[in-house]
Image: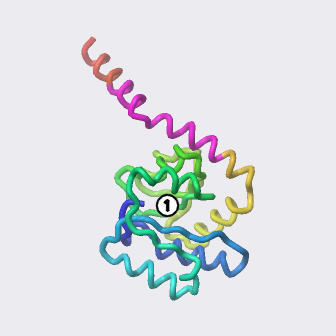
Amino acid sequence: MGSVQPRKNLVRLVEAYASLAAKRDVPPLILAGRLAWLYHESVAAAAKYGVKEKIRFLGFVPDEDLPALYSAATIFVYPSFFEGFGLPPLEAMQCGTPVITGNLTSLPEVVGDAGIMVDPYDVNAIGTAIELLLADKNLRQDLSRRGIERAKGFSWETTARKTLEVFESVMV
């Protein structure tokens, strides 16, 4: 989601997916996002690791179509190196999709205990987390419930209420 560029770490995601696909049957990997600089590295990685036929590159997905895409996913993997906030994991959690995300920058604050955090530089850690979630339906259901609850804390209503509370505390 967002844009396909190096900081999204899709090359390592593709490598982890390929490693897992060599060991077991896996669902297709869907990559979505506006094509940005060096996006071709992700496409080249799919060919390099022999999984190009198992990966779907959707390109840009309009906002109104995102909930359907998130909801149809078994899991959502976002191993980004850097995010100012990390809206896609929050959107996925809001739709009840279990999340795997990088453990850097703002992502741990956004996801909290409602997802699995991995070192985005560690291909094995990414693959292990994917394998764990694909194999464990109970864990997926638990993370789905926790994600929905966590996402409620970031709603516009909650944000407005918290902002108003700060203003009121300053005005007193």
Please name whichever residue, 117 or 164, is drawn nearer the observer in this view of the structure. Answer: 164
Element type at mark 1:
strand
Amino acid type assigned to the residue bearing label 1 in the image: Tyr
- Please state the horizontal and vertical placement of residue 69, each as a whole percent of the image: 51, 56
Does 151 sit above or below residue 58?
Answer: above
Quadrant of res 168: top left
As drawn, is 44 to the left or to the right of 134?
A: left
Q: Quadrant of the C terminus?
A: top left
**Which residue does the image show at 59% across and 46% down from the upper left?**
96
Q: Nearer the viewer, residue 76 or 12?
A: 76
> Is residue 92 placed above or below 161 in the rendered structure?
below
Q: Position of residue 102 (x, y in %)?
A: 50, 59
Q: Residue at x 67, y 71 (%)?
A: 26
**Placement of 18 over or under 135, stated as above or below:** below
Say whether residue 1 is left or right of residue 70. Answer: left
Please check the rendered image and state whether residue 157 is part of the magenta-colored stretch, yes or no.
yes
* Number of numbered labels in the structure image: 1
> Most prominent secondary structure in the magenta stretch?
helix
User: Around disc 1, counting alpha carbons within 10 Å, would you say few (fewer than 14), some (14 to 19), or many (20 or more)?
Assistant: many
Most extreme residue toward the left, as rendered? Answer: 171
Label 1 sits on residue = 78
Q: What colour scheme was applied to this rendering of the protein? A: rainbow
Query: Does 71 lie within the magenta span?
Result: no
| Residue depicted at x 60% and y 79% | 18
Q: Residue 45, percent across and down? A: 48, 82
Q: Residue 27: name its quadrant.
A: bottom right
Residue 128: where, in percent of width, then height? 65, 67
Q: Quadrant of the N terminus?
A: bottom left
Residue drawn where x is 38% and y is 60% of the image: 2
Task: Identify the magenta region.
Answer: 143-163
